[in-house]
Image (tube, rainbow, N blue to C red):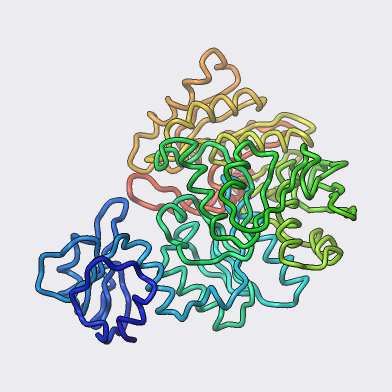
Amino acid sequence: MLLKDLLENVDITELATSLDLEVSGVSYDSRKTKPGDLFVAVKGYESDGHDYICTALEKGAVCVVCEKNPGLSVPFVIVKDSRKALAVVSSEWFGQPAKKLRVIGVTGTNGKTTVTTILKQVIEKCTGDKAGLIGTSGNMIGDRFLQAEYTTPESYEMQELLAEMVKEGCKFAVMEVSSHALFLHRVFGIEFEVGVFTNLSQDHLDFHGTMEAYAQAKAMLFENSKKSAINIDDEFAEIMISHATGTVFTYAVNDDKADLVGKSVKLNSDSVSFCALTIGSLIRVELQIPGMFSVYNALSVVSAAILLGLDIDMVTEALPSCKGVKGRAEVVPIGKDFTVIIDYAHTPDALLKIILAIRGSAKGRVVTLFGCGGDRDNKKRPIMGAVAVEHSDFVIVTSDNPRTENPGDIIDEITFAMKGMESKYRVIENRKQAIFWALENAQPGDMLILAGKGHETYQIIGKEKNHFDEREIVAEFFAQVG
């Protein structure tokens, strides 16, 4: 492929090569660079691609895209933003796959994984077409599952995945769009047919700094969406709406001015049901996932389906048979007189929502076991401690993924908000031992929430990723006690 074809829509500030140069590949990681590649130097979290230009050239790169003069007698192109350039170049390299798909993006602090997973199922049930999925729990092309490293992949892998979806006959692509991905331009250049906003609560402040900056990053999705579905019960909805450049469709439970309103909500132990009012019609909705958050997730899906032009009767018929997501309000079958639930809740808002959701159907105590991740937003730790001890009957504070932090220090920050309530919590640093203790001390009717790990089947201690599946831990306990 000629360089001029790859750079056609890139904002170039200086050109030191022939645009007729033949390029046989694209890379941004010097470790993966091959002879004939165009190497795009991108600034990362821990390293700067500009520092590896020489390595890429040694491996055979024929040209470099960068933000500053490399100071070498080599073909190079200087651009204003190499991240944006990587997104555009990657799209061109793979044949602009996003333009061949109906792309739906879902952003927000909580609910993205569940909404995208259910929406994919609804689309396939209602249209008969194959849909792709990109998200935290994994990527899918139709029924084929692919492991995911990030919620939203880097732009090159994103475009490669979209191209694979096109190749395998997908008509739709549903993706979680993280604030990091938006801010770092991983989805730059993709025009979304529908953008969905679920909610916003404290998370990733180690990266964004303030809630305002976090919200502004999320709002970037709606600048590139033809149609937007916005939850106006959320206090940050106005920011999302102000950035929307296309049609805005609103949904809510508590605001009757919304275009779609959830009414007559019934929260069951294993499901939710409600009536959804929209212009000229009333529809009955049921979803086999417990909790008030499931009402909002269902409203998100219905809103997106309406904006996609799907038959609303087929949508409501499809929803009850849709499966939830591993690690999201997941009930672990144990055959005992108490219940174990695994949930990914790792933010204050998500933890509060799962506790309140379970409390609504609990016959006994609500016992919450959780920790906080290391090398991540430490401001939320005492907030999560306060949420857990205030709304649970008992709390077990333990490790999550401590990474390079001292687990005891993380726990101290969590329990700082629990002073004076020592009778309501217990600290057991080792997570496996904590789970064993919780199971051993469970009482009839208890609802035990194992929060924070969700779908993850590992625990990161230091820089080591160790196998750790809470389902297996629970099974191991009962195998030992009989």
Q: Is residue 476 above or below residue 321?
A: above
* Total count of labels: 0
The x and y percentages for residue 385 are 53, 27
> Which residue shows up at 70% across the image and 43% down it?
293
> Which residue shows up at 84% across the image and 52% down it?
278
Nearer the observer, 133 or 456: 133
Q: Is residue 129 left or right of residue 468?
A: right
Nearer the observer, 369 or 284: 284
Quick check: can you spot residue 200?
A: yes
Q: Is residue 134 above or below residue 63?
A: above
- Quarter of the image with the N terminus is bottom left
Q: Is residue 56 left or right of residue 346?
A: left
Q: Is residue 251 above or below residue 70?
A: above
Q: Is residue 148 left or right of residue 57?
A: right
Residue extending farthest to the top is: 420
Q: Is residue 91 above or below residue 261?
A: below
Quick check: can you spot residue 476?
A: no
Q: Residue 345 is drawn in which quadrant?
A: top right
The x and y percentages for residue 342 are 62, 46
Q: Is residue 298 left or right of residue 85?
A: right
Nearer the observer, 225 or 158: 225
> Which residue shows up at 26% across the image and 69% down it?
65
The x and y percentages for residue 469 are 53, 52
Q: Residue 174 is drawn in which quadrant?
A: bottom right
Nearer the observer, 442 or 114: 114
The x and y percentages for residue 18 are 22, 82
